[in-house]
Image: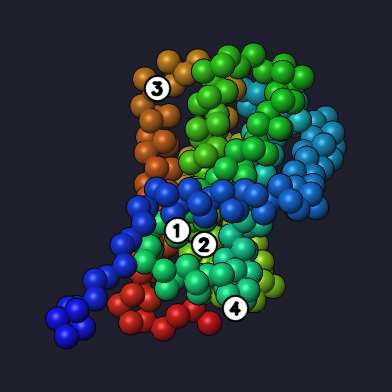
């Protein structure tokens, strides 16, 4: 009787890092087992870079960049596009996991909702970083003399950008029921952010309205801190107020995206309806 009257204790909650690592590892393992996904996420930005670079180089003569070819200018933009596509392909697994019942199993487990967000987003960041390392091998061929610290800064920047893009993707995918609808919404939102980031053309010299839109776009600041290490030493950048300002904007974007995703997932615990 005494044993029966003793209240049952809640099951122990697994730590946030261990859950996040397990989910991130699952995302990366799924990625390496899908060669078509790897080919698509790397091949499409690479095709854009080669076609646009060779086609627009003869007419690319912006102020202060007369000696730069469009292939060289567009290279950081191509890396940014690769991160964008990696985020889309990675966060679409949220919908697939829901359809297969895996997500429901994770949600009823005694784990932090923040761990779910960090795991899915962290796995996508690892995927984007892996692809970045592959494509960064082309940098010396283009004449970039970036040192080891410069490449480290570039990889850190790409990780931040991946977290921002993937946070937005996770937030969108959580409330969607179909992969086709998710693709349509993501392309409607993310592609304009990329087009207006300075990846395709410099911010300087554009019409005032367009320049205003580009300056309030957080991806523009991401493009700024991604391009800078290819041309300046890390020590000089970390003492540059303009660079640090753009870095702060990107960091704020990442925090807001991850925070909004964690809040969206946490609504289920407070009795909100589960995503359909």
Q: Secondary structure at mark 3?
A: loop
Q: Position of residue 189 (x, y in %)?
A: 58, 62
Residue at figure coordinates x 36%, y 81% from the top left = 272
Mark nearest the camera among 2 and 3 is: 2
The answer to whether residue 7 shows anywhere in this view is yes
Q: What residue sits right under mark 2 in the picture?
A: 170
The answer to whether residue 165 shows anywhere in this view is no
Q: Name the residue at the front extreme.
A: 1
Instruction: For the residues labelled 1 and 3, say whether their Cβ atoms are less than 8 Å apart.
Output: no
Instruction: For the residues labelled 4 and 3, say whether their Cβ atoms are less than 8 Å apart.
Output: no
Mark nearest the camera among 2 and 1 is: 1
| Separation (CA) of disc 2 from disc 3 | 31 Å
In the image, taking residue 155 as reference, residue 243 lies left or right, namely: left
Mark nearest the camera among 1 and 3 is: 1
Q: What residue sits right under mark 1 in the picture?
A: 117
Q: What residue sits right under mark 3 in the picture?
A: 238
Mark nearest the camera among 4 and 3 is: 4
Instruction: For the residues labelled 2 and 3, say whether their Cβ atoms are less than 8 Å apart.
Output: no
**Image-quadrant location for residue 79:** top right
């Amino acid at each position: 009787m005494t044993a029966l009257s003793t209240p049952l204790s809640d099951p122990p909650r697994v730590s946030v890092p261990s859950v996040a690592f397990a989910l991130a590892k699952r995302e990366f393992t799924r990625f390496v087992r899908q060669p078509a996904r790897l080919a698509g996420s790397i091949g499409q930005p690479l095709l854009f870079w080669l076609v646009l670079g060779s086609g627009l180089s003869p007419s690319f003569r912006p102020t202060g960049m007369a000696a730069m070819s469009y292939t060289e200018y567009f290279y950081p933009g191509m890396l940014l596009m690769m991160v964008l596509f990696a985020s889309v392909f990675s966060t679409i697994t949220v919908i697939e996991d829901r359809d297969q019942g895996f997500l429901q199993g994770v949600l009823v487990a005694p784990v932090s909702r923040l761990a779910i967000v960090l795991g899915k987003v962290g796995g996508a960041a690892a995927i984007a970083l892996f692809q970045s390392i592959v494509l960064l091998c082309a940098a010396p061929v283009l004449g970039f003399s970036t040192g080891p610290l410069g490449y480290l800064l570039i990889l850190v920047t790409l990780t931040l950008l991946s977290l921002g893009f993937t946070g937005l993707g996770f937030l969108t995918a959580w409330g969607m029921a179909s992969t086709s609808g998710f693709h349509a919404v993501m392309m409607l939102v993310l592609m304009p952010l990329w087009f207006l980031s300075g990846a395709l053309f410099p911010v300087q010299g554009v019409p005032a309205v367009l320049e205003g839109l580009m300056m309030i776009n957080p991806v523009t600041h991401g493009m700024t801190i991604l391009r800078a290490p290819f041309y300046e030493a890390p020590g000089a950048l970390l003492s540059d107020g303009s660079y640090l300002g753009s870095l702060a904007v990107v960091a704020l974007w990442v925090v807001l995206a991850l925070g909004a995703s964690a809040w969206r997932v946490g609504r289920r615990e407070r009795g909100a309806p589960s995503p359909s």
